[in-house]
Image (tube, rainbow, N blue to C red):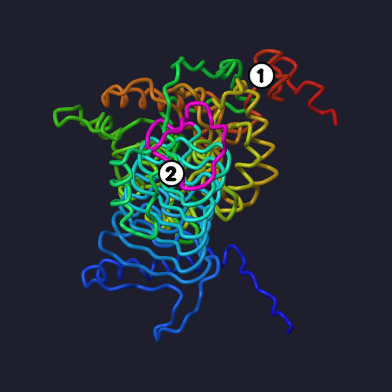
Amino acid sequence: MEQQAIIMAEPREVVERSFNINKKLGPRLIEAAKQDAILRIGWTSAGDPVPKNGELGLCPNLPTGSKMRALGVLGSWIAAFGSGGNFTIQGDTGAFLGAANRGNTIVCEQMAGDFSGYAMRSGKISVMDGVGDDAGALMQGGLLVIRGSAGARIGGGMKDGLIVIHGDVGIDPGAGMTGGKIVINGRYPSRLPTGVTQRLLTAAEVKSINAELDNAGLDIPKDAACLVPSEMLQVEAPEPPVSTSDLSSIGLVAGDLHHTAAYQTCDTVVLVADGEGEKSPIALPLPLLPVVSSGEFLIMPDESDPLASQILAKQPFITREQPRPIDFVFIDASNLADAPELLEHCSGMVVDLDDLPAMNSEEIDGFIVATRTMLSMDKPISFLNAISRVESLHVRSAHHDIDLAISRIEDGSGMAEAAALPMIGRSTTSHLSDTGIQTGILLGLSASGQDLAILCASGISVVCCEVPMQDPHDLAHWLQSISTELTDILKRLGLDSIELLQRQHLRALDYETAAISGLRLVGYDRPLPHWFAR
């Protein structure tokens, strides 16, 4: 019999289809939960099966009491960030099933991919036909049940919770775990990772676990192995190398332009996102996104100076928690499960790709669908990656239509900031030309007005940095001092807008900086000869 060819959908088509499913389901989920009704994906309204094929990022943050059933082969990041719903998949699913789970009950009746239950805090995930690698990684609570084989590093880095496997597991089970239990009713490597030990379960533990499983077909026997963390000698980790220099060896020259009048105003506003399509641009008073741990540090007391309050009220920050409506939320593994609340009350998102697991294009698409469903389509998304991976960052940003690509200087390589500038510039020219995607940089220390001018002249749109203090009144004065310094530099150069800063305004003040940056050496007034060599 002749076999029909399977027509695979284009990635953009799958992403759009997935967004549309989430958009349609959103208003119906709460109403269905009130009526104790089950919503279905993969069937017609008449009940005829129409299996899904590759849809991803479906049903993030399922509300308490909601019930979903899906049919087909689904992609990554399915039913992530759930708060107490029920999700059943009659078929296979990709990576990150139930990631950052906070109360969902999820059943996958066939296979699931890598990182199932990643960073989950509570709830229950059951997979009936095996999982890929890293299932239960960074788990902080809840129950993960697997029938069938599990790949490498199951429970890697877990802090709490329970994983039960009825089947064989791959290498390095529990690697880096500091809490929780991994119960294995099957074969596992005889050589366990450092910091992991095997013991037998007590009769009380067997009874308690089987009661939690609440399924006679999944009961564990009394001879099942239990992997738990073992005590290790605690040593202080060495500090990673830091950047070998700052931007103090780069100067700004005016060229043939006359200085402007002292009373002339200068435009220092930068827009994040170009406003095309559904996206709305975010106005930054300075080309700056300072980083604070919590938005509570930005709240001024009632009796504060109104001018200082006004400065903070207009300046967006990047924060890990308690964002204001104008702030960007910093998302990494530590606060991933808090994403639903954080993304509801912010103006954009910065995703730390260095801290989250390495993801392929399909998995990134799934993550974007899930998080954008909670964030909304009109708010900007930024990717943050190590400076040594700048080309990969820009390629991914262009492929996934990210608004801002930020390179982290302090990535452990010790690379000088001046050396990072040509790397970002070359990659931008090669991968981001005509895309509308902006480039950013994350410094290891707080920035000055001089730093902003140098980096903007290098073609960088947004500078991110740590703040020198946490007091809101002091932060307002710091921002004002940067604004004053930046404006004075523009006037000295004869410019009335930060958009007019160009690479021709930069000079390397010493030979070493000229050698690593490709900037014109002051006095010599052109790049060093080796920058012209093929």
Q: Which residues are magenta?
A: 176-200
Magenta stretch: residue 195 in it? yes
Q: Can the viewer see residue 86?
A: yes
Secondary structure that dominates the magenta span: loop
Residue 234, quarter of picture: top left
Per the rendering, the mark at residue 224 is 2
For the point 57% across and 53% down, the residue is 400
Q: From this viewpoint, which residue is outermost toward the right? A: 534
Q: From this viewpoint, which residue is outermost toward the bottom? A: 46
For the point 26% across and 29% down, the residue is 308
Q: From the viewer's perspective, is residue 43 above or below residue 330? A: below
Q: Type of residue at label 2?
A: Ala
Q: Position of residue 505 (x, y in %)?
A: 62, 27
Q: From the viewer's perspective, is residue 246 above or below residue 422? A: above
For the point 56% across and 27% down, the residue is 411
Q: Position of residue 167 (x, y in %)?
A: 51, 51
Q: Can the viewer see residue 266?
A: no
- Left or right: 338, with 253 as reference point: left
Q: In what quadrant of the picture does the N terminus appear? A: bottom right
- Left or right: 139, with 32 as reference point: right
Identify the residue position indicated by label 1 in the image.
508
Q: Position of residue 300 (x, y in %)?
A: 21, 31
Q: From this viewpoint, which residue is outermost toward the left? A: 303
Magenta stretch: residue 318 in it? no
Q: Type of residue at label 1?
A: Ala
User: Do the CB atoms of the residues marked 2 and 1 lie less than 8 Å apart?
Assistant: no
Secondary structure found at label 2: loop
Q: From the viewer's perspective, is residue 33 above or below residue 461? A: below
Secondary structure found at label 1: strand
